[in-house]
Amino acid sequence: MSLINAPLKGDSVEPNPRKHRGWIVGAVIFAVFCIGVLILIVMPSEKPTTSEILADSYDTLISHYKSLTELQQDDFWKNAQGETVTWSGKVDEVRKGEILVETKSGNRFKAYFTNQDDELLKIDKGDDITLRGELFQRANLIHNWGIRNVEIVN
């Protein structure tokens, strides 16, 4: 405060509420912002359910599965095993009772058929195919993911 505007002896000095209003508004805005950031950091994001993941493509399943810890993979498999999936890709190999299919991203899965070799004879390597079946085998060092009781969708 400068001497020119200084109150004289005996003058009363009353606080100016307008001076503090801007500071208070700024403090409130900052507090709301901080609370919002904390909520975003602390609250977990919604994870897709097993059913939602299986309803999507095979590549979505693989991407999700690889992002999990070993313990989470085991839990995911318990929920996924036996579920019906519909997957698409290009035929890589046709053998008696099975087709090996490769997706656009290069992932592979096996489809196992029962007594449908006449139908399998009509399928050529490189054909685009969509299959629906029961998820029964997860990938390991020896096997690809597998579906059985397969129906050719197209």
Image: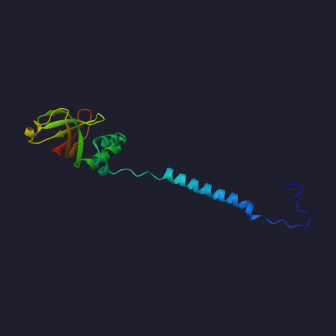
Report which quarter residue 88 is drawn in: top left
x and y, in percent, of residue 95 in the image: 13, 33
Q: Examine the rendered structure and indicate whether residue 91 appears above or below residue 8.
A: above
x and y, in percent, of residue 30 in the image: 62, 54
x and y, in percent, of residue 104 in the image: 29, 36
- Residue drawn at x 87%, y 54% is 2
x and y, in percent, of residue 136 in the image: 21, 44
Decide if residue 78 is in sight here: no
Report which quarter residue 120 is drawn in: top left
On the picture, is 41 further left or further right than 131? right
Report which quarter residue 112 is drawn in: top left
Quarter of the figure with the N terminus: bottom right
According to the image, what is the colour scheme of the structure?
A: rainbow
Q: Examine the rendered structure and indicate whether residue 76 appears above or below residue 141.
A: below
Picture mark count: 0
Decide if residue 90 is in sight here: yes
Quarter of the figure with the C terminus: top left
- Residue drawn at x 43%, y 51% is 45
Please, which residue is most extreme toward the right here? 9
- Residue drawn at x 28%, y 42% is 58
On the picture, is 48 further left or further right than 16? left
